[in-house]
Amino acid sequence: MSTTVMRTLSAAAALAALAALTPVLAAAPAYAATATFNDAVGDISHSADLRSVSVNNADKNVRIRLTVRDLAPNKGVGATVFLDTDGERGPEYAMVAGLTGGADYYLVRTDSWKLGKARTPMTCSHTLRLDNAANTARIRISKECFEAVPGDGDMRVEVRTSGTADGKSVVDWLGSARTFGASIAQD
Ligand SMILES: [Ca+2]
Ligand SMILES: [Ca+2]
Ligand SMILES: [Ca+2]
């Protein structure tokens, strides 16, 4: 092999190495206006198996996209999205959604991971859209829903999906149960 060819090859190898590095560098900041959190595949054996959660923390709305294994209308999948708006332990709000057919959903204030007590659904602007083919649910919550808190609008999110198998309830938490992901800065 001639010296020229060797040089060309090593330059190409260097470029390939750089190209391989770039996505890693781009994905490095965990603290950004948009963040994606992946959950284990197959940690529950149910259509509700949560795959990923993307959060866009914009000025007027927070948008959360959930991807599960199978969102076909007859699968009986539900989800609860817990929101931390004050940077302190525990959620302040939760959006509870049936991800099936009629897609009933509501947003409540909470001071706990348990939503068992009677709650009054909030009337501020929030929506849920399902894409059965893509197995995604897209949630939008207006920032007007949240009480003004000290800080600059950073948010943390935890998600629990749920379903029923053989008469028993199964749940899948995003990452560790009752643990928020990295804080997401507002745009
Ligand atoms: Ca999962
Ligand atoms: Ca909190
Ligand atoms: Ca999980």
Image: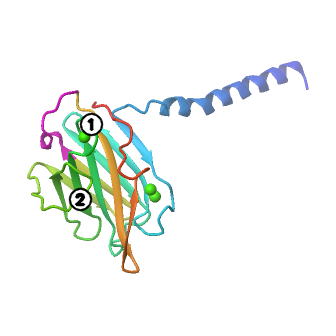
Q: Residues within 10 Å of mark 2 (few under 14, many from 20)?
A: many
Residue located at (51% from left, 58% from top): 41
- Residue wearing tag 1: 88
Q: Is 89 or 103 nearer to us in this picture? A: 89
Which residue is outermost to the right? 1
Q: Amino acid at mark 2?
A: Val
Q: Secondary structure at mark 2?
A: strand
Evaluate whether residue 134 shows in this view. Answer: no
**Quarter-of-image position of residue 181:** top left
Residue range of the region highlighted in magenta in the rendering: 141-151
Q: Is 58 or 113 nearer to us in this picture? A: 113
Looking at the rendering, in which quadrant would you find the N terminus? top right
Tell me how the rendering is colored: rainbow
* In contact (CB < 8 Å): disc 2 and disc 1: no
Residue located at (12% from left, 59% from top): 119
Q: Is residue 14 left or right of residue 2?
A: left
Question: Where residue 84 sits in the image (x, y, percent)?
Answer: 26, 42
- Residue wearing tag 2: 96
Q: Is ligand 2 within 8 Å of the beta carbon of the residue shown at mark 1?
A: yes
Q: Residues within 10 Å of mark 1 (few under 14, many from 20)?
A: few
Foreground: disc 2 or disc 1: 1
Looking at the rendering, in which quadrant would you find the C terminus? top left
Residue located at (34% from left, 53% from top): 159
Q: Is 74 or 49 nearer to us in this picture? A: 49
Residue located at (34% from left, 35% from top): 183
Q: Amino acid at mark 1?
A: Glu
Q: Is residue 183 magenta?
A: no
Question: Where residue 114 sits in the image (x, y, percent)?
Answer: 25, 57
Count the marks.
2
Q: Is residue 146 magenta?
A: yes
Question: Where residue 42 sits in the image (x, y, percent)?
Answer: 51, 62
Q: Secondary structure at mark 1?
A: loop
